[in-house]
Amino acid sequence: MRIGIVTISYNQARYLAEAIESVLLADPERLEYVIVDPGSSDGSREIIERYRRRFSRILFEPDQGPPDGLNKGFAATSADILGYLNSDDRFAPGALDYVLSYFERHPRIDVLCGAIRIIDEKGEARIRRRTPDRIDLRRYAYETCFFWQQATFFRRDALLKTGGFNTQSQTAWDGELVVDMALAGCRFAYTNKLLGDFRIYGDSITGSGRFTEALHRDRVHMREKILRAGVPAASRLEVRVMRALYKFNLRRHWSYLFEGEELEANP
């Protein structure tokens, strides 16, 4: 069994080498690594060239945005287990080898969601990790269910069931892919093991706030998709209750203490 990782790169030379190095910590005999850069002009391509021999494929061609680049990247790998990393984030040491081992030990699992840390532009981490919630499409539709792209991995068959990333999404292609996997009947599992670091800083999509309108539009689209699939809508009162219960859920706030805990899979 091999793991295929895709990194999408565009003008983030400041963090790119760190992202690449975090992937290359995996067992090289079991790693397929594809990098996609549609036209960086800040020195990113020169960094990529320094690692050329370590990549399975390098795609230097225009695309229609990150989700389109990811679709091209995954099409360029034949690995059994898949994951992806933005060029300003990083995987935790040992994460990819753990993921491979997990899927080998759990052949019925299609998707694994793990824990992350939030880091700043200097790579310094906040104290508390973010652990994954169990996938609940109704709660996700109303923004009371969260999982993390840097710690989400899946079998190739799960990706094929969805048709890939929605190229029309500007901000939430990662979340929509997981929604599509859930709608396709994929079986999820969860671990509190730290698998990745999510970097938030002034120029990132999350940190800058530049995509607020697009994020709202993408979230509405996903909510409508979930409701069209037959998931019951929630009233305003139900939404307020869901959000209050989520905010004050002590088990969620303290789950980061149980690092490495493997939780039961969704039925």
Image (spheres, rainbow, N blue to C red):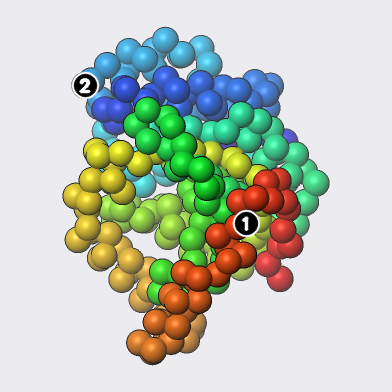
- In the image, which is nearer the foreground, mark 2 or mark 1? 1
Q: Is residue 267 left or right of residue 216?
A: right
Q: Nearer the viewer, residue 185 or 189?
A: 189
**Circle 2 crowding by C-alpha within 10 Å: few under 14, some 14–19, many from 20:** few
Residue ID for mark 1:
255
Residue at 25% x, 65% y is 217
Q: Position of residue 230 (x, y in %)?
A: 48, 84
Image quarter where the N terminus lies is top right
Callout 2–callout 1 Cβ contact below 8 Å: no
Mark 1 secondary-structure assignment: helix
- Asked where in the image residue 15 lies, by quadrant, the reply is top left
Marks 2 and 1, the one that precedes in the sequence: 2
Residue at 80% x, 46% y is 105
Q: Amino acid at mark 2?
A: Ser
Q: Amino acid at mark 1?
A: Ser
Residue at 32% x, 13% y is 46
**Circle 1 crowding by C-alpha within 10 Å: few under 14, some 14–19, many from 20:** some
- Asked where in the image residue 49 lies, by quadrant, the reply is top left
Give the number of the disc on residue 41: 2
Is 152 drawn above or below residue 228 in the view shown?
above
